[in-house]
Image (cartoon, grey):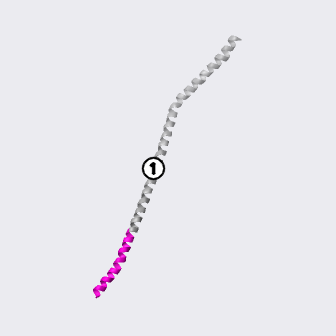
C-alpha cells in the first residue's frame, strides 16, 4: 500500500515536471531561435559595415590616386599654360603691333 502510494505520488510529481520540462525546452528552443536570429542580424550588420568601410577605403584610395596623378601632371599642365600664354602673347604682339605698324 505504501509502495502504491509512493508510486502515485511520484506520478503526480513527475507528470507536471515532465510537462514543465517540455515547456521549458520549447521556451529554450524559441529563445535559441531568437538568439540565432539576433546573431544573424548582427552578422548582417557587421557585413554591411564592413562593405561600407571597404567602399570608403576604396574611395579614399581613388582620391589619393587622383591627387598623385594631379601632382604628376601638374608640371605638364603648367607647361601647357605657359605655352598658351606665350601663344597669346605672340598673337597679341603680331596682330596689334606688327599689323598696326605695317598698315598705319
Residue 33 to residue 1: above or below: above
Please name whichever residue, 50 or 20, is drawn nearer the observer in this view of the structure: 20
Residue 41 to residue 87: above or below: below
Quarter holding residue 80:
top right
**Residue at left offset 68%, top offset 11%:** 102
Please name whichever residue, 44 or 33, is drawn nearer the observer in this view of the structure: 33
Of all residues shown, which one is farthest toward the bottom? 1
Residue 92 to residue 74: above or below: above
The reply to whether the magenta stretch includes residue 20 is yes
**Residue at left offset 32%, top offset 83%:** 8
Please name whichever residue, 69 or 35, is drawn nearer the observer in this view of the structure: 35
For the record, the magenta segment spans 1-25
Q: For this view, does 56 lie left or right of residue 30?
A: right
Q: For this view, does 58 lie left or right of residue 85?
A: left
Please name whichever residue, 19 or 67, is drawn nearer the observer in this view of the structure: 19
Find disc 1 in the rendering and name its residue: 50
Which quadrant of the rendered structure holds the C terminus?
top right
Of all residues shown, which one is farthest toward the top? 103
Q: Which secondary structure is most common in the magenta stretch?
A: helix
Residue 19: where, in percent of width, then height? Answer: 37, 74
Q: Residues within 10 Å of mark 1 (few under 14, many from 20)?
A: few
**Residue at left offset 40%, top offset 62%:** 33
Residue 46: where, in percent of width, then height? Answer: 45, 53
Q: For this view, does 26 lie left or right of residue 77?
A: left
Amino acid at each position: 500500500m505504501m509502495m502504491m502510494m509512493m508510486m502515485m505520488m511520484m506520478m503526480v510529481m513527475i507528470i507536471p515536471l515532465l510537462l514543465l520540462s517540455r515547456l521549458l525546452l520549447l521556451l529554450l528552443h524559441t529563445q535559441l531561435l531568437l538568439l540565432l536570429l539576433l546573431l544573424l542580424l548582427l552578422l548582417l550588420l557587421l557585413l554591411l559595415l564592413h562593405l561600407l568601410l571597404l567602399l570608403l577605403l576604396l574611395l579614399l584610395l581613388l582620391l589619393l590616386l587622383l591627387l598623385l596623378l594631379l601632382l604628376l601632371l601638374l608640371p605638364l599642365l603648367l607647361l601647357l599654360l605657359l605655352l598658351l600664354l606665350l601663344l597669346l602673347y605672340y598673337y597679341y604682339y603680331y596682330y596689334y603691333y606688327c599689323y598696326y605698324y605695317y598698315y598705319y
